[in-house]
Image (cartoon, rainbow, N blue to C red):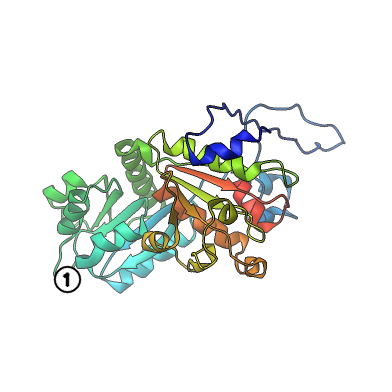
Amino acid sequence: MPASLATETAGTPSPCAFRFTRTTGAAPAPGGKKPPATEGPGPRRRLTTIGLGAEALESESQAPRPIRLVLVEDVADVAVHVREMLRSQPRFKLVHVISDGRRAAEQIADLQPDVVLVDSLLQGRTSGRAVVERLRASGSPVGVVALTVPEHEVDPGLAAQADSVVTLPFGTYDLGRGIIDAHIAATARDPSASSRIVAVFAAKGGVGKTTIAYNLAVSLARTGLRTLLLDGSLQFGDVRRLLRADAAAPSICDLPTDCVRGSDLADTVLRDPSGVDVLLAPPRPELADLVTGRDLEHVLDVLRRAYQAIVVDTPSTLGAPPLAMLDA
């Protein structure tokens, strides 16, 4: 690797063309015969699938990322009913229930869900139509599902702004269909919402992995993409040293482990002069044990909604956290 590459990080990145390829291996078929190789990405492997049969592994590996949901509902019984229906659907993930429609727009902007379920018959001081109007006025591309009952038709103003309408009592299929329709409509409104995650990996240290990750992040940012560099080498991160960040600078350990919000990221990431946001590794090796593979999944899930490009500088070892990064 040319020595000049590291010095170019302070100025214009080197106009190098990176080609990323992935090779996959297939598990032997019954009888010892190896199935023919196939092109394209191989199955996603997760630690939770160890010990499962081949059918379960394939089903788990092809499962898409859950659609994040927020429910705006001020009737506790209805909220419990919807939550129980969604609990049995791995395709969907209910991240929060908002009981006060007056604060819905601000909380939704912070939680950054894919789809919002809004009861059109909110009994508080704010109507379901007002909640959706505030969302649309804020410019949020989030999908909206309006919930109603047969005795009350959806307000025409709300129906015009909602992506789908689901009428109580509804079954799992009807609710799921409405959520998926709203998600498709939201994606069509904001094509830039789709994010890209690139994990830079090397089997040993000292080969310029961190420098490549940084230069790649800078190059992506200069194309106009909102870009973040994640130092995934949790024990011995090199990004802090590369950027000469202070030891007291915030790191991934400062994020909450239960529910990461957009405001939490704003207080934790560092803005590099190149225009790249940086999420640093812990400042001391022993703090790496505080971050699990599940924590990284949650963090990456939120980062996908805040950034269009995410570059991960991974460690040169394998374990739960590195596999979570490579899996993403």
Question: Residue 114's x, y, as percent?
Answer: 37, 50
Q: Residue at x 19, y 66 (%)?
A: 102
Instruction: Name the residue nearer the viewer: 213 or 52.
Output: 213
Q: Residue at x 37, y 66 (%)?
A: 81
Question: Residue 75's x, y, as percent?
Answer: 27, 71
Figure quadrant of the N terminus: top right
Provide the residue designation for mark 1. 124
> Please, which residue is most extreme toward the right here?
32
> Please, which residue is most extreme toward the bottom here?
76
Element carrying mark 1? loop
What number of labels is visible? 1
191 vs 50, left or right, is left
**Residue 67 makes an appearance in the image:** yes
41 vs 129, left or right, is right
Q: Residue at x 45, y 52 (%)?
A: 303
Question: Residue 149's x, y, as percent?
Answer: 22, 58
Instruction: Name the residue nearer the viewer: 129 or 104.
Output: 104
Picture quarter containing residue 79?
bottom left
Instruction: Name the residue nearer the viewer: 296 or 59.
Output: 296
Category of crowding for the residue at label 1, using alpha-carbon neighbours closer than 10 angstroms: few (below 14), some (14–19), many (at least 20): some
Instruction: Name the residue nearer the viewer: 53 or 265.
Output: 265
Question: Residue 97's x, y, as percent?
Answer: 34, 66
**Residue 151 makes an appearance in the image:** no
User: Which amino acid, mark 1?
Assistant: Gly
Picture quarter containing residue 93?
bottom left
Up-down relation of residue 101 to residue 232 (above or below):
below
